[in-house]
Image (cartoon, rainbow, N blue to C red):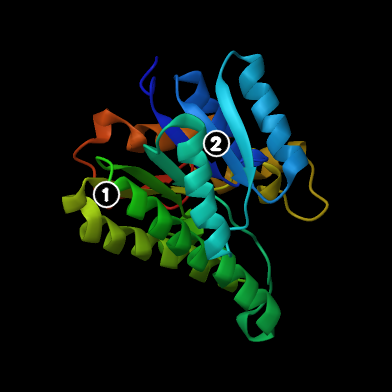
Amino acid sequence: MNRFTGKTALVTGAGSGLGRAIALAFAAEGASVVAAGRTESTLAETVRLIEAADGRAAAVTADVTDSGQLRELVHSTVARFGGLDIAVNNAGILRGNGPIGEVSEEDWEAVLRTNVTGVWLAMKHQIAHMKEHGGGAIVNVSSNLGAHLRVSGLGAYSTSKAAVATLTRIAALDHIHQGVRINAVSPGASDGPMSLRPGETEADRAERAKSETPLGRVAEADEIAAAVLYLASPAAGAVVGTDLVVDSGSSA
């Protein structure tokens, strides 16, 4: 399939895990991809993988907590590939685990600053460009641990992801009349390193998932990426402000 030939996609947090899978998936379907994140070496590897498959990509380092860097990221994307049609706001952190009354102020503020304010700032600059250049599609990465499922000990992260889901719906209503279509995807546990518990191996996780998920396994990063691509595609042209859950049935 080549649903995104001639389009430019910007993916934050694209140096590893789900962000890398999303970047590779867009490139495989014809998009020119800007892989953004904080670590130059991991972004370079994402670009190398895309180019090895005859795709087009560029790496741009940016911190989503810095508005100026996000503004420059949009400018760099447009300068490199001529436009910005799709943005995926995937960058996020997981910190402050434990009972909510014991989470440090530093961890709480870091999680909210990255996971919520970072998405808002990114959208702010992406929307500013898109609404002046024919519109576009934005997909924010939330989590099933936000608005869909509660797990003790993950209060900071869950709060941040619930906020992303609500922010997405409000932004979608605010900007659809300007041609900017905004949605979210909420993954559950996947085959990436973030869903491994301390000391757990991938084999341990697979065994645990047999009893903890209705599907009997965690989602693969490529399956979550496929949901992101759907939301960004013309096939989802009437999908506005949704939160698409991909969690092996855990929150059903």
Decide which of tag 2 and tag 1 comes sooner along the chain: 2
Q: Nearer the viewer, residue 81 or 231?
A: 81
Q: Tag 2: residue type?
A: Val
Tell me if residue 218 comes above or below residue 198 in the rendering. Answer: above
Of helix, strand and loop, which one carries label 2? strand
In the image, is 251 to the left or to the right of 202?
A: left
Q: Amino acid at mark 1?
A: Lys
- Residue at (48%, 46%) from the top-left corner? 75
**With respect to residue 142, does 215 lie above or below?**
above
| Percent of width and height locating residue 176 | 21, 51
The residue to which callout 1 is attached is 131
Q: Residue at x 37, y 46 (%)?
A: 138
* Residue 224 appears in the picture as rendered: no
**How far is mark 2 from mark 1, CA to CA?**
20 Å
Q: Can you see residue 56?
A: yes
Q: Which residue was labeled with disc 2?
A: 34
- x and y, in percent, of residue 230 in the image: 35, 32
Farthest right residue in view? 199
- Which residue corresponds to the image point at 59% horizontal and 13% vertical from the top-left? 54
Q: Nearer the viewer, residue 250 or 97?
A: 97
